[in-house]
Amino acid sequence: MLRFKQKLVNVPEIKVLESPFGDSWSGITLVSGEDVTPGGTKRISVLIDSGADKKVIDETLIPALAGEGLALDRIDWLLNTHTHGDHIGGHYRIRELAPSIKIATFRASLDKMKNPLKYNKLIRARFPMHSSPPSVSLRGVDPDMLLDDGDIMCGFLKLVHTPGHDDDTVSWLDLRSQTLITGDTLQGNGTPVQGISFYMYLDMYKATLKRLMDMKINNILTGHKYVPIDTAIEGADKVKECLEICSEITARNSSLVNAAMADGERDTAIVTRRVLAALGAKEPEFLFLAMYTIAAHIKETGG
């Protein structure tokens, strides 16, 4: 049985469940703590992201919570890092099984949260010949609360808007330990399945990396395994090194795309395959995610 893991030695309040997602995994983060309210102090349990689908909830999340001594309906809040299917695919099932759980999301995510299948199809519509079938099981939810950049949940989780991967991507900063729960914010060189970073908005991604460089962050927890960064980065120096690696990889991607453009290549799929080959990466079964990244670099060149 999969269990929640304490990935940071000195941060017992935050644990990560590596929920199944194809040939990889998607992180569901459990954060616990004391919420001080006018009525007193209350023990709080928060989930950040919900995995890919109903099966993840029934067969992975619920047993893993039981291992922590928690039933699903003992969770107080369900949050998310962004609205891609592998991160909110379980939201509907959680609400179905435990309607007492309150759901909060970034204000810019509202439409996508209410209709994730529509957005799932829209992402694929740009490169239809290179896209996987849509995740037709996705069902939306109406959140109980909308949040803005800088809002604080439960007294210790601060929403940080970190766009780039998508325009509504956020991270959650645990103010007690200065641990940043990033989801897909930091791409490194992408997952082993992708073969390259996946950011839809290059200018936003660069701005996010700069913003994080200027923040006090002691630790990072990512939402997937990214190459070559680790899933848990401990210590401010390691955090800075991780952010620098992401910046260097982005600059390298620009150089590779520029080289292809200089050779007269303009077709996004051809340029993507050329970059993957230069990186020594295996071409994924569906190229559309990598193509978004390459298209963003092509746009930067004015091509």
Image (tube, helix red, strand yellow):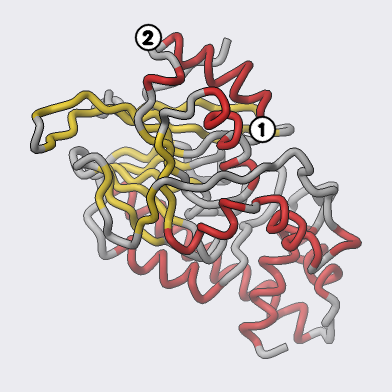
Residue at screen point 58% across, 10% down = 1
Vertical arrangement, residue 76 with respect to residue 197, above or below: above
Task: Decide: few, some or many residues near mark 2? Use Cα within 10 Å; few <14, some 14-19, many ≥20.
Answer: few
Residue at screen point 73% across, 33% down = 22
Asked which quadrant contains residue 166, the reply is: bottom right
Vertical arrangement, residue 156 with respect to residue 55, above or below: below
Q: Secondary structure at mark 1?
A: loop
Q: Which residue is mark 1?
A: 53
Kindly report the distance in space between the C-alpha atoms of the residues bearing marks 1 and 2. Answer: 23 Å
Q: Earlier in the sequence, mark 1 or mark 2?
A: 1
Q: Amino acid at mark 1?
A: Asp
Q: Which residue is mark 2?
A: 69
Q: Secondary structure at mark 2?
A: loop
Vertical arrangement, residue 47 with respect to residue 242, above or below: above
Task: Decide: few, some or many residues near mark 1? Use Cα within 10 Å; few <14, some 14-19, many ≥20.
Answer: many
The x and y percentages for residue 243 are 40, 57
Residue at screen point 33% across, 49% down = 239
Q: Is residue 111 left or right of residue 79?
A: right
Q: Is residue 10 left or right of residue 76?
A: left
Observer-nearest of 244 and 72: 72
Residue at screen point 55% across, 67% down = 250
